[in-house]
Structure formats: C-alpha cells, structure tokens
Image: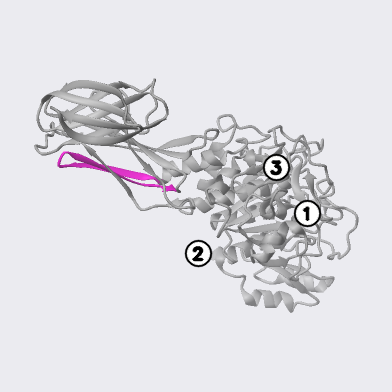
Amino acid sequence: MDSSDLPVTARYLDSVRLSGSVTILNTSKWLNGVSIQTNDAIALAKINSLPFVQSVSGIALRIVTTASGNDKFEKEKEQLPPQLKETGVTADFFNYGLSFDQVHIHNGEFLHNIGLRGQNMTIGILDAGFYNYQTLKAFDSVRINGQISGIYDFVAKDSSVNEDDAHGMHCFSTISANIPGQFVGTAPKANFYLFRTEEVSNEYPIEEFNWVCGAERVDSVGGDMISSSVGYTIFNPPLSAYSHSYADMNGNTTMAAIGADLAAKKGILVVCAAGNEGNNINWKYIGTPSDADSVMVVGAVSTSGVVANFSSYGPSSDKQIKPDVASVGLGTIIQFPNNSISGGNGTSFACPNMAGLTACLWQGFPEFNNMAIINALRQSASKAATPDDRVGYGIPDVKKALASLLKQFSTASAYVSNCTATIQWTSKDLSSMKYEIERRLPGQSSFIKIAERNGTGSVFSIRPAYLVQDVLSGVAPGMITYRIRQILDTSTAGLTAVYIDTISVDLQATCVDANLIDVTLAPNPAKTVLTVRVTTPAASSNIVIRIFNSNGQLVNSLNKSKVPGTAFYDDISLVRFAKGKYYVNVYDNNKLIATKELIKL
C-alpha cells in the first residue's frame, strides 16, 4: 500500500462538481485526477482557481454516442479465410481445430496438457467493446461456467459492453474460446473482467485517462493481468496539439504509460499490443502504453514465424527493447460477429494470444512476481541472444519458460549418515513427469543414474519433498556430487528435461558397514550399458551376476571379485538384448544375495 492506493479526496470532487454545470465522468486515484464534462466556461475558470487543482486541460470533445465512420480497428476486423490450417487437429487435452498453430508456435499445448489452462487466474481486458459476447458461440463455456466476473463501460458510464464495438470481442475470443475441433483459446479456464475504455469513432486523450481508470479497476477487483490491444499516438482535431511525438514514447510521459507502470508496480502483469503502424511512413513505432518499461509488448508474426509487415517497430525513444516478444497476429483465428470462426490480422490478436499463455504459465508459478514471469518468457524466446526492434526477444517457448522457472523454484539437499547418503528435493510435477537422480563419485569424470522417481497428481503443482537414499559403503573419501534431472515431457517428439539442482556431500573417510549387503542397478531402465553395484562387508573372489529374460532363460553370466565394501561392475553390455523385462541375480560364493528387476529400453 502507498499513497496511490488512496482515493481522490472526496471534498476535492465535491468542489469540482459544485463549480457549475459539471458532470464527473471517471476518477483516477493513480493520476490523482478526474475527467469531467462541461460547456460552462465560468465553471472551468472556477475549477482552475481551486487551490488543490494543479492543471486543467481539454482531453475530448463532448462524448459522441454514434460512430462517425472513423474506426481505428477497421483493418483488424476484416474477415480473412484461414490459411494453412487444418480442422480437427488435436493436441491431447484440447482439440484446437483451426487455432492449433497459434497455440503450438509457443508449445502452448504443453501447458494445457499438464493442467495449466488459466484456472483461478483473473484477466482484465481493456478495449473498445465486446459486441454480442453474450450470444456468440466462442463464449458459451465462459458464460455457462460463470467466468466473466464483471463488466463496465468507462466511456458510456454504464454496465453494458455487449452492444459496443466488436474489437474487444475478437481479442477476448483469442484467450477464452472453447469450441472443440474448431477454436480453443490460450487460457479458456481463466476468469475475466471486460472493460470498455476506448471510443472507436474518435481518438482523444480521454481514452488514455479511461485506460488508467480501467487498469485501476482491475487492481481493485484483485486482477492478475491486463490484456490491452489499444494504443495511442495521434489525436483527432481539434485536439491534434495533444498528439504524441516519438520522443514521448519514453515510458514516463503519457497518462497511459504512467498508469501501465503503476499497474505493474501493484503486481499486475500488463500485456500490450505493439500496434499496426509498421507500414506507416509517418509513424512506424509502437504507441503508448506499450512504451511503459514494465509491460510486455507483443508484436505480430505468422504461424510460421514470419514478421507481419504491419507490426509496429521499436525501440521506445529511451531505447528499451520493444516489442518484448511476438505471437501470431497474421491470420489469427478469432470469433466474428456473424458467428463464424476465421482469420484476422493485427497485433491486437497477437497480444491476447500471448496473454492467455502467460496466464497459464503464471498459474503454475504463483510464487514468482509479474516481472519474473515476463523475464522467463523473454529468455525462452527465439531471439533471446540477439533481440531486435521487430520482434524483440522473439517468439516465446512456454515449455522452456516453465523449465527455467522450475529450475529457479526447486531446492535440494543431501547428507550422509551410517554409510548412506540421503538426497531430498522439492519441485513441481504431475504423474506424466519423472526424476532421474545422477551421481558422480570421487575420481569419476561423469555422472551415472542411480535412481528414478515418478511424479504424482493430475495437475502440475508443488509436491511434498521427495527422498532417495544412496548406500556409500566402500566408497573412497572425497566429494560426492548428485544432480537431479526432471523430465518434463516424456513424449518422443517433445522430450524435454532440465537439471533442477546439483548438491554435494563430503565423505571424510571410506565407510564400511559391517552388516550391509546391497545390490543396485543403474541406470534402470537401461539402454546400452548396465552398472551393477554390489555392497558386502567382506571381500569375495566369487561374485556371480546372472541375467535372465522374462521366460526364465539365462542370457548373460559374469564372474567377478571384490574388496570389502562396495564394488561397481560397469562393463555389462545390453546392446544385443531385446527390449523388455529382465531379472538380475547376484550370488556371493554360491549364495543368492539379491534379485533385481531390469527394464531394457
């Protein structure tokens, strides 16, 4: 909490209201200001003389209620036939249909498949209206499930946005749609606030003020994110003098940028469209609030990753890398007012496409703040090492971003007691994931796998601490290092793993347990080579290792010797073994000391 969380002083508002023929429109605590409507020159003079008023300026003509034919989103609303799309494409949990490519370009289906679909995340959408969202089929699920938490129109000052412009509806569908086999959005299980802050028929500074008021409302209702596909540069006459210059795009000048950064300061993750001015010879740059330094700005690419020529350029005038990332804004699948599903062009659609996946990623890691999530997405992107002024850090890979956050989140520890090392770790997983524990002994140059653990649960989330014990009898003194490899995606095509932590223990002396007898196979499952670790208190000149297949046939037999403690037999080739289950029997002087099951990959 700080002073910006306090409401504008009530007696100040009363004084303004009572100055003459004045109607208060919207009030911003973050800007410590109020927008009013009046044609009373005497009232304006009186307001300007009030001791608490720092400045008064015109920010719009009298509010119009009918469109003037000047629709800033006209090109984005053009319905395009889907190209290079397939219907009925599935990706395990969701059947995306036409929208698969715009999800898959970010590996977004991975998040959905592990249970991260936007549940319990709240997204505020600031736009120009959400025409017919109450009846269009893309929104059936969010309506039936009560996922629309609230609406408000900051332009008309009422609680209805269904009859207004369609632009916000297009953007909303990119996140929330759920029409199996045709169109599924990037966070279809999220909760939403729909706020109209934009008047499409004219372009005036009041829309920036409304934007800030909308952002404040998202904060007040406990929203996690803002997705905003509006931006401001040039204003219509007679307020052209208030138009922004490129120098104003420094993150600290405009009302919208100041409000966006304050939203970020409050912990809200703000996602903005870069703009569609890339082809404009008079202005090719991003608009505001995309110049704010703490928001994630999204440029447009095709589903194959080619930059859309209309996507606005960065950097900001203070040389921030803008846009931050890129998503599909060329031929993006969206809902249209005629109840058809088709393609549309614009960074307006790239923004919510990315915002939805960002919500799913953050759902998995509520321990991290908004800026940490943005940074993980930047660093996961295709041009992270060489960002540019067209796509910034590039096209994010949310699977890589999750792996990066998981590595930061996970913790591990190890200690030795009674000739046994205990390795503990905490991470996040689900049943389709698994862990491999690897160890490097003193004098060894490489790690070997000594154990595995499977994940649990049906939704990716934190688990109670895992534990593995490693018998060290007979191991030479020195530093023993363990590392934990978490396999996130076990599918052949998408195999992804990350080392989540590395820990070491210092063995002060060779440890011999006079009563310990132990046999361990590593790795298990194994593919080409097997290591058998045998621990016995005494030396032996007749250690016999016999391997049987699942039919009971002997397929390999080895005779070995050992000193007291632990011996490692790591030269057992499995290359000629067929895939399947085997049994390893270990004898010490004709006495069976262990039978272990082995899986050959």
Q: Nearer the viewer, residue 464 or 332?
A: 464
Residue 247's label in the rendered image is 3
Write down the residue under mark 1.
167
Q: Residues within 10 Å of mark 1 (few under 14, many from 20)?
A: many
N-terminal of the pair, mark 3 or mark 1, is 1
In the rendered image, residue 419 lying in the magenta stretch gets the answer yes
Amino acid type, residue under disc 1 in the picture: His
Q: Residues within 10 Å of mark 3 (few under 14, many from 20)?
A: few
Amino acid type, residue under disc 3 in the picture: Ala
Residue 1's label in the rendered image is 2
Q: Residues within 10 Å of mark 2 (few under 14, many from 20)?
A: few
Amino acid type, residue under disc 2 in the picture: Met
Left or right of 177 on screen, residue 42: right
How far, Cα to Cα, is label 3 from label 1? Answer: 29 Å
Type of secondary structure dominating the magenta stretch: strand
> What range of the chain is rendered magenta?
410-429
In the rendered image, residue 185 lying in the magenta stretch gets the answer no
